[in-house]
Image (cartoon, helix red, strand yellow):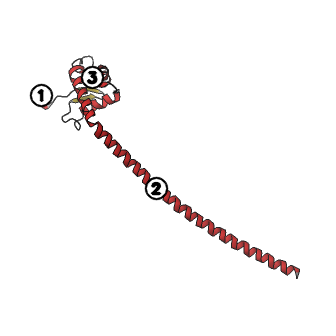
């Protein structure tokens, strides 16, 4: 009798372990589903924040352009007038047949009061704008080689 009692207890223990094992597997699958739900929600939130951040950056850049538009056009005007009246007049075609190099034009103008706080890259961008027909139509400067500028021949002045 003693052996049968132990066999019954042993069988109950095994069935209890099997039930607990099933419960553990179900809990693991439920926790995976919940984790997947929260990960998906976090991914959607991250994507929404990324899009919002990109939109905010675009709006900020547009506002900066609008607020500086007058300043940029004024600086472009000053760069053109100085290039036309000072830099281009001192240009020697025999020494520099391709035109005035942008660094030389910048160094000519660097002591001007209106150029305070303007670096060489900004000055070159303004020269590029003056040579671009999409910005100033007709373009006021012409490129002969990358970085070299001359006064453009306007149609009315031929």
Distance in Å between CA atoms under marks 2 and 1 = 60 Å
Is disc 3 placed on a helix, strand or loop? Answer: strand
Residue at numbered disc 1: 157
Residue at numbered disc 2: 45
Q: Estimate how packed mark 3 is, as few (under 14), some (14 to 19) or many (20 or more) residues with alpha carbons within 10 Å.
A: many
> Is residue 158 at all visible to an observer of this figure?
no
Distance in Å between CA atoms under marks 1 and 3 = 21 Å
Q: Nearer the viewer, residue 64 or 84?
A: 64
Q: Residue at x 43, y 52 (%)?
A: 49
> Is residue 103 at all visible to an observer of this figure?
yes
Distance in Å between CA atoms under marks 3 and 2 = 53 Å
Question: Do labels 3 and 2 touch, CB within 8 Å?
Answer: no
Left or right of residue 37: residue 9: right
Residue at numbered disc 3: 100
Corner quadrant of residue 101: top left
- Where is residue 103? Give x, y as percent: 32, 23
- Where is residue 4? Give x, y as percent: 84, 81
Q: Which residue is drawn at 20% across and 21% down?
A: 85
Quarter in which the N terminus is drawn: bottom right
């Amino acid at each position: 009798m003693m052996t049968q009692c132990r066999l019954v207890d042993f069988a109950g223990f095994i069935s209890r372990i099997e039930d607990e094992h099933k419960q553990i597997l179900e809990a693991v699958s439920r926790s995976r589903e919940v984790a997947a739900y929260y990960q998906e929600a976090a991914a959607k939130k991250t994507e929404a924040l990324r899009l919002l951040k990109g939109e905010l950056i675009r709006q900020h850049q547009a506002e900066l352009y609008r607020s500086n538009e007058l300043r940029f056009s004024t600086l472009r005007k000053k760069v053109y007038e100085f290039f036309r009246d000072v830099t281009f007049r001192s240009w020697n075609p025999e020494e520099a047949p391709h035109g005035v190099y942008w660094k030389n034009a910048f160094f000519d103008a660097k002591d001007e009061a209106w150029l305070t706080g303007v670096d060489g890259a900004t000055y070159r961008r303004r020269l590029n704008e003056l040579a671009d027909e999409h910005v100033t139509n007709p373009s006021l400067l012409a490129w002969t080689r990358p970085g070299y500028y001359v006064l453009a021949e306007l149609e009315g002045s031929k």
